[in-house]
C-alpha cells in the first residue's frame, strides 16, 4: 500500500484506490468471486503463513473491496484499512482487536445509540467493561476514569444526536498520557470534512452505510489504522507475543506499524467473518466519487435550514454545530472548517405530540431510520433509535423527549425550507 502522488481530497474521491493498468477496465470491476486460483501449492502455503501478499478467500480480502479500502485509507491519511459488514462490526472489531475479557475502555457518553448498546451490553458479555464519560468533562475527570486495565478511549467526531464536537486535542493528550489508542468514529463528519488522524487519533472507524454510500443502498463499515501507535509499550502483548494461530507470527515484528490493521484482518475477519461484499464495496466506491460534492451541499443546506428554524416562532431550540448558539461552535470552526455535515436537531413547542404531528405534516422529508443519504429525512430518536435506553441514558447521550433529528439532504434548499415551513404552520 505505497503512497502515490499527493492529490487533494476531491481528486482522491474520484480517482483514489483503483488504479487500472493499460487495457484494464476504467471502472472498478466487481470481482464477485469467493476464491482465487493458484498454480503452485507453495504459493498458497505462503499466503496462509502470511509470508506473501495476495487474495486467497474473500472473507479475508477481495480486489473490489481492497480498492474501496485503499480509497478510504487515502482520504483519511492512514496506513491501512479493513472494510467490514457494518458500522457496528467496525466498532466491535476495532475494540476486540485490542481488548479481551477482564479489560476496560473509556467512551464518550454522547454516542450513536447502536454503539452505546454494543459497549454497554454486548461487550460487557465478552467481559470488556466500559466507563462512559461526558466528552465535555475536564481532563482530570476523564483521567480519573482510567484503570490499570484500560486499553482504549473512544469518541465520535460529531456526537449522535447531540452534535457535540469532540475536543480532539484534549482526548489525544489524555490518550498519550495513558499510552492507549484513541479510537474515533468519524461517520457523520466523513473523511472529506475531517481527518481525526491529523488531530491525534490512532484508529478511525466509519459506518460506510451513511455518507460514504450516500444513497442508502448498502450496509457497511471500515476501520482505518493511522499506524501511529506504539503497540510495544508493554500493554498489548497480543501484538508482540507469538500468535499460535499463525505459526507464532509476531505482529509488530513482522508488520511494523501496520500490526493493528493486519491483525484485524487476518485474525478477526478470519475468525468472526464480518466481511464486506464485493457488490457493496463497488457501491461505496461509487458513492465516494461524489462525497466531496455532496458533503459541501449537505453542510450548506443544513446550515441554511438551521438558520431558518432558529428564527421560527414554533421552534423551541435548534442545534447545529456551526450556529453561533451551539456550545461546540468554536470546536466546529477549529475541526470542521469546510462544514459541519448534514445533521441537525431541533425541538418544537408543544413537545412530543407536536413533534409527531410535525413529522406527519412533512411532504418532501420522509420519516426513516437512517441518515446521510441524498434525501432529507427526519426521526424522533426517543421513540426509535434511542428507545432501548432508559431516560437517564437518553439524556446522557443528548436525547431529549422533544428532539427531532433531521438528516438534511442535497435537494434544493428552497424546497426543503418550504416543506418545513408548511409542516410547522399546520400545527395549532
Ligand atoms: C449508523 C452509525 C453506526 C452504525 O453503523 P451501521 O452501518 O448501521 O452498522 C455507528 N456509528 C455512527 C455514528 C452511525 O451513525
Image (cartoon, rainbow, N blue to C red):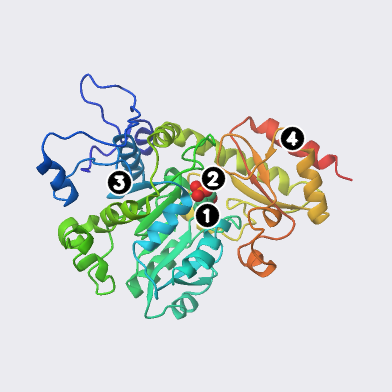
Alpha carbons under labels 1 and 3: distance apart: 31 Å
- Picture coordinates of residue 2, whole percent (x, y): 20, 43
- Cβ of mark 1 under 8 Å from ligand 1: the answer is yes
Which is more N-terminal, label 2 or label 4?
2
Q: Which mark is residue 341?
A: 2
| Front-lying residue, 72 or 149 | 149
Rendered position, 379 above or below 13: below
Sequence-wise, the earlier of marks 2 and 1 is 1
Q: Which residue is mark 4?
A: 419
Which residue is tagged 3? Answer: 60
- State the CA–CA distance, disc 4 to disc 3: 46 Å
406 above or below 232? above
| Above or below 141: residue 26 | above
Mark 2 or mark 3: name the one nearer the start of the chain: 3
Q: CA distance from mark 4 to mark 2?
A: 20 Å
Q: Position of residue 116 (x, y in %)?
A: 54, 62
Q: Is residue 286 left or right of residue 378?
A: left
* Residues tagged 2 and 1 counted as in contact (Cβ below 8 A): yes
Q: Within 10 Å of the Cα at label 2, are there few (<14), some (14-19), or many (20+) other Cα atoms?
A: many
Foreground of the two, 52 or 155? 52
Q: Tell which circle, 4 or 3, labels the residue nearer the N-terminal end.
A: 3
Q: Quadrant of the C terminus?
A: top right
> What residue is rendered at 59% in x and 44% in y?
370
Depth check, mark 1 against mark 3: the one in front is 3
* Secondary structure state at the residue bearing disc 4: helix
Mark sitting earlier along the chain (1/4): 1
| Left or right for 119, reference 75 | right
Residue 145's place in the image compared with 79, above or below, is below
The image position of residue 238, as x and y in percent, is: 26, 67
Per the rendering, the mark at residue 158 is: 1
Amino acid at each position: 500500500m505505497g503512497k502515490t502522488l499527493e492529490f487533494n481530497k476531491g481528486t482522491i474521491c474520484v480517482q483514489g484506490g483503483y488504479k487500472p493498468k493499460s487495457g484494464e477496465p476504467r471502472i472498478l470491476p466487481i470481482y464477485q468471486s469467493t476464491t482465487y486460483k493458484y498454480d503452485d501449492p507453495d504459493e498458497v502455503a505462503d499466503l496462509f503463513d502470511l509470508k506473501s501478499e495476495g487474495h486467497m478467500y474473500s472473507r479475508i480480502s477481495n480486489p473490489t473491496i481492497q480498492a474501496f479500502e485503499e480509497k478510504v485509507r487515502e482520504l483519511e491519511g492512514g496506513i491501512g484499512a479493513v472494510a467490514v459488514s457494518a458500522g457496528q462490526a467496525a466498532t466491535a472489531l476495532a475494540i476486540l482487536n485490542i481488548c479481551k475479557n477482564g479489560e476496560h475502555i473509556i467512551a464518550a457518553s454522547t454516542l450513536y445509540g447502536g454503539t452505546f448498546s454494543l459497549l454497554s451490553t454486548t461487550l460487557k458479555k465478552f467481559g470488556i467493561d466500559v466507563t462512559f464519560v461526558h466528552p465535555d468533562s475536564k481532563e482530570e475527570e476523564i483521567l480519573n476514569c482510567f484503570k490499570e486495565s484500560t486499553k482504549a478511549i473512544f469518541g465520535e467526531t460529531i456526537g449522535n444526536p447531540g452534535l457535540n464536537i469532540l475536543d480532539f486535542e484534549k482526548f489525544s493528550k489524555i490518550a498519550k498520557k495513558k499510552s492507549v489508542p484513541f479510537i474515533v468514529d468519524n461517520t457523520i463528519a466523513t473523511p472529506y470534512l475531517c481527518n481525526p488522524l491529523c488531530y491525534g487519533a490512532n484508529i478511525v472507524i466509519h459506518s460506510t452505510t451513511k455518507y460514504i454510500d450516500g444513497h442508502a443502498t448498502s450496509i457497511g463499515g471500515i476501520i482505518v489504522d493511522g499506524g501511529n501507535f506504539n503497540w510495544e509499550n508493554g500493554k498489548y502483548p497480543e501484538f508482540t507475543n507469538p500468535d499460535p494461530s499463525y505459526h507464532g507470527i509476531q505482529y509488530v515484528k513482522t508488520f511494523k506499524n501496520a500490526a493493528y490493521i493486519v491483525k484485524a484482518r487476518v485474525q478477526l475477519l478470519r475468525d468472526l467473518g464480518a466481511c464486506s461484499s464485493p457488490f457493496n464495496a463497488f457501491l461505496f466506491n461509487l458513492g465516494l466519487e461524489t462525497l466531496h460534492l455532496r458533503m459541501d451541499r449537505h453542510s450548506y443546506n443544513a446550515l441554511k435550514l438551521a438558520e431558518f428554524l432558529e428564527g421560527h416562532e414554533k421552534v423551541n431550540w435548534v442545534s447545529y454545530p456551526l450556529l453561533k448558539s451551539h456550545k461546540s461552535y468554536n470546536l466546529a470552526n477549529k475541526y470542521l472548517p469546510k462544514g459541519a455535515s448534514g445533521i441537525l436537531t431541533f425541538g418544537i413547542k408543544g413537545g412530543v405530540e407536536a413533534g409527531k404531528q410535525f413529522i406527519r405534516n412533512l411532504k418532501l422529508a420522509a420519516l426513516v431510520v437512517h441518515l446521510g443519504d441524498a434525501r432529507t429525512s427526519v426521526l424522533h430518536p426517543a421513540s426509535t433509535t434511542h428507545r432501548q435506553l432508559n431516560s437517564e441514558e437518553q439524556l446522557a447521550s443528548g436525547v431529549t423527549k422533544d428532539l427531532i433529528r433531521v438528516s438534511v439532504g442535497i435537494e434544493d434548499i428552497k424546497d426543503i425550507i418550504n416543506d418545513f415551513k408548511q409542516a410547522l404552520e399546520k400545527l395549532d
